[in-house]
Image: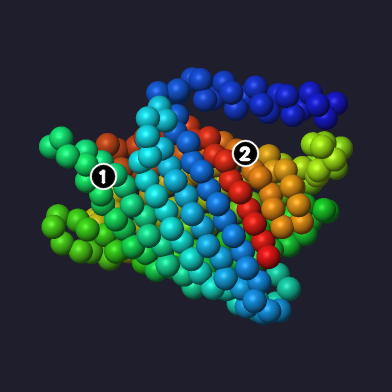
Amino acid sequence: MYSRKYLLVIIIIFNSLTISAQQLSGWFFHSHNQKLNDKWSYATDFQLRSSENLRGIKSVLLRGWVSYLLADSRTIGLGYTHFGNWDVEDGHDSYDGENRIFEELQLDNDLLGIEVSNRIRLEQRILNRDIRTQIAQRFRYQLALVIPLEKVKIFQRSTSLILQNEVFLNVQNQDAANAHLFDQNRPYIGWGISLAETTEVEMGYYYKTQIDKIDGMTNSNIAQIKINTTF
């Protein structure tokens, strides 16, 4: 029964990827969380994103933040992100970098053995637009479920199913972003394998819908490999 369900999920993902293969890209993601004491911790993210058709590296993301535990289920954080894109203009490679400061609130709960995470993040985006620097604010809400798969083990290692969605809204200075309230939406399904107490490897798939100021609304298929470490 279980194997048939998981096989069906894999078939659905494969079909989605092949339908829009021309828009397939890949993300490599490493996320690390370091506990400092009972209340304080810091975390870092490193991400490389390919261009369409996996032709090469398109984007890089570097993120770091500190978090404070308010209670058993509530955490607040303050951080910084650098996001950059490589492109070709007039036959020459160019690099466009965006800097962000962000604040977040995360609520973590256990519901019948399922890890439920709600995260609210507010970003102040420093954008280079029309040869001048502008600041826009973006609101992000992410809901994530981590479902243990007790009967599915790989080399005696536990596995889990990850279901997630994140919506992005431009809440201030929309003209500097994409001139719309809606920015993007990212539903996601993943499969995590615990390699050790401190390391997990996750493989998953995003279907991203985004409004771009020039191209309008676009849909993208994204395959992701993620490594999570915690100390």
* Circle 2 residue: 203
Helix or strand or loop: what does disc 1 sit on? Answer: loop
Q: Amino acid at mark 2?
A: Met
Pick whichever of labels 2 and 1 is earlier in the sequence: 2
Residue 105 percent across, percent down from the top left: 56, 69
Residue at the (20%, 64%) spot, across then down: 133
Residue 104 percent across, percent down from the top left: 52, 68
Residue 197 percent across, percent down from the top left: 76, 56
**171 or 7, nearer to the observer:** 7
As drawn, 51 above or below 160: above
**Picture quarter with the C terminus:** bottom right
Q: Quadrant of residue 126?
A: bottom left
Residue at the (61%, 73%) spot, across then down: 41
**Label 1 crowd (10 A; few <14 / some 14-19 / many >=20):** some
Q: Quadrant of residue 122?
A: bottom left
As drawn, 227 above or below 19: below
* Circle 1 residue: 213
Tell me if I can see residue 158 in this picture: yes
Nearer to us: label 2 or label 1:
2
Q: How is the image coloured?
A: rainbow
Tell me if I can see residue 105 in this picture: no
- Between the residue at mark 2 and the residue at mark 1, the CA separation in whole angstroms equals 31 Å
Q: Amino acid at mark 1?
A: Lys
**Label 2 crowd (10 A; few <14 / some 14-19 / many >=20):** some
Residue at the (37%, 60%) spot, across then down: 82
**71 or 51, nearer to the observer:** 51
**Picture quarter with the N terminus:** top right
